[in-house]
Image: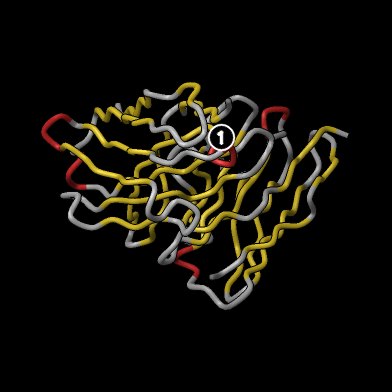
Amino acid sequence: EIVLTQSPGTLSLSPGERATLSCRASQIISSSDLAWYQQKPGQAPRLLIYGASSRATGIPDRFSGSGSGTDFTLTISSLEPEDFAVYYCQQYGTSPFFGQGTKLEIK
Amino acid sequence: EVQLVESGGGLVQPGGSLRLSCAASGFTLSSHWMHWVRQAPGKGLVWVSRSNGDGSGTAYADAVKGRFTTSRDNAKNTVYLQMNSLRAEDTAVYYCTRDTRYGGDPSFDFWGQGTLVTVSS
């Protein structure tokens, strides 16, 4: 089973700052199988990034994904108030697996 | 507009059963694999099960294998999750989600609002 480890667990930043979220896989995975989701309290997750770097429909271009092999990154270039949420990376594979999440909170 | 609406959650005693439904609209259900994902209170997302387009192929997480069964009725645009022998650790919000392949890359692009299952005596 491939395990995804996200870091940091909590990230405290201010609006306008740049956020960098990490997702590390326990073994090499295909970039095609790596996605990122955003979840706000009381809401369902929302797809942000698929294929490691492609933005989903309607996702602002301040969100970008990168990486390959075992190391992947979600970057939010300039934080907006609505971006403070929990972010999950996901590996699709035979049994889809989610990372434990990074909580992005207002500093 | 794509919509997924779950129902069927509630309070059930340990060892009991529950069937969740996910009503799909705005797209052709048979063209998509569908998944169930759960989230225990205050915890992260955990994949539970999936079914292929015609329901002939299914897969389950080890934690629910042998107890949960996913099925679908494409004519009724509905996906189901039959949950038997429920345990306290099955307590969670259960989401159904659509599997999509943009350019061949898989992801879960639409999610329902979730339905809460509480297993307690």
Q: Determine whether A22 is above or below A10 in the image.
A: below
Report the residue that reaches farthest toward the left. Answer: B75
**Residue B92 pos. (x, y %):** 55, 34
In screen coordinates, is A63 left or right of A48? right
Point out the image quarter for the C terminus of chain B: top right
**Residue B16 pos. (x, y %):** 43, 32
In screen coordinates, is A44 left or right of A74? left
Q: Nearer the viewer, residue A96 or A82?
A: A96
Point out the image quarter for the N terminus of chain B: top left
Label 1 SS: loop
Residue under label 1:
B91
In screen coordinates, is A31 left or right of B71? right
Q: Nearer the viewer, residue B73 or B3?
A: B73
**Residue A28 pos. (x, y %):** 56, 78
Q: Quadrant of residue A43?
A: top right
**Residue, x 38% and y 61% (percent of image)?**
B105
Q: Amino acid at mark 1?
A: Thr
**Residue, x 56% and y 34% (percent of image)?**
B91
**Residue B55 pos. (x, y %):** 20, 49
**Label 1: chain?**
B
**Residue, x 46% and y 36% (percent of image)?**
B15
